[in-house]
């Protein structure tokens, strides 16, 4: 199955302001989006989880394989005019968003390119829409991405690659793919997200039941 709309990707120009980025609507084709969502990992907690620790079906695995393909790498090398051959990669997955998520940031120094692919079928909320920002101000918006329908945002990480979103709580399916500078950066990303996932699981497990909270 052909997952991605490469024609749409190729015809979408790279934006250079406020930093190098590209937004592609419907990058994941509709049939592929259905297959990916049918086999999406069950994620009950908020936060990002390394794909290596998740369980999912073959539809989602097809996407993971496609992200790691040479075709995918070459397309982004051409778009951003940057060499990525031999660079390590990371894949993290989100299933849910909390009200405190989406704080403005630039991404960590070791990342080269960040790719966000949004997989909710539909989106109606004003919150949770990723904003490409000119400054560290959530209202200084250069572009906004609806986090659904296979939409893609990719950007070259820099000291001013500010982005964030207004508060939202609920299901928000997004896969983040990165090329990073070296193996050390790859390990740091993996360990940081794995530790975060473990802490959140422990906190969720330690919460008293509703009946106990009412006592």
Image: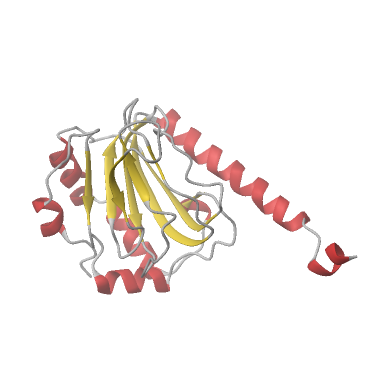
| Residue 18 or residue 182, whichever sits in front | 18
Residue that appears at 50% across and 56% down: 168
Quadrant housing residue 149: bottom left
Q: Is residue 109 above or below residue 149?
A: above
Expressed as whole percent of the image width and height from the top left, the position of residue 8 reads 13, 58
Residue that appears at 24% across and 33% down: 18
| Residue 45 or residue 127, whichever sits in front | 127
Quadrant housing residue 194: top right
Residue that appears at 54% across and 61% down: 43
Q: Is residue 95 left or right of residue 24?
A: right
Q: Is residue 80 above or below residue 149?
A: above
Q: How many marks?
A: 0
- Colour convention of the picture: secondary structure
Q: Is residue 115 visible?
A: yes
Q: Is residue 110 left or right of residue 83?
A: right
Expressed as whole percent of the image width and height from the top left, the position of residue 103 reads 48, 40
Q: Is residue 68 visible?
A: no
Give the position of the C terminus as an image quadrant. Answer: bottom right
Q: Is residue 167 above or below residue 60?
A: above
Expressed as whole percent of the image width and height from the top left, the position of residue 96 reads 52, 59
């Amino acid at each position: 199955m052909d997952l991605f709309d490469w024609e749409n990707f190729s015809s979408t120009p790279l934006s250079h302001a406020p930093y190098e980025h590209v937004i592609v609507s419907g990058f994941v084709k509709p049939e592929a989006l259905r297959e990916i969502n049918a086999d999406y990992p069950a994620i009950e907690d908020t936060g990002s989880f390394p794909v290596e620790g998740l369980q999912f079906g073959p539809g989602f695995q097809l996407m993971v394989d496609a992200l790691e393909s040479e075709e995918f790498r070459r397309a982004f090398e051409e778009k951003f005019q940057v060499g990525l051959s031999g660079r390590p990669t990371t894949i993290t997955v989100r299933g849910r968003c909390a009200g405190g998520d989406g704080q403005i940031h630039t991404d960590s120094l070791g990342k080269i390119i960040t790719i966000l692919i949004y997989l909710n079928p539909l989106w109606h909320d004003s919150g949770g829409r990723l904003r490409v920002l000119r400054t560290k101000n959530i209202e200084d918006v250069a572009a906004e991405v609806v986090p659904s329908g296979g939409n893609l945002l990719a950007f070259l990480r820099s000291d001013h690659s500010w982005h964030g979103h207004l508060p939202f709580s609920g299901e928000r399916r997004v896969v983040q793919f990165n090329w990073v500078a070296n193996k050390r950066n790859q390990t740091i990303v993996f360990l940081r997200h794995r530790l975060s996932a473990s802490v959140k699981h422990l906190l969720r497990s330690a919460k008293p039941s509703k009946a106990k909270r009412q006592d």
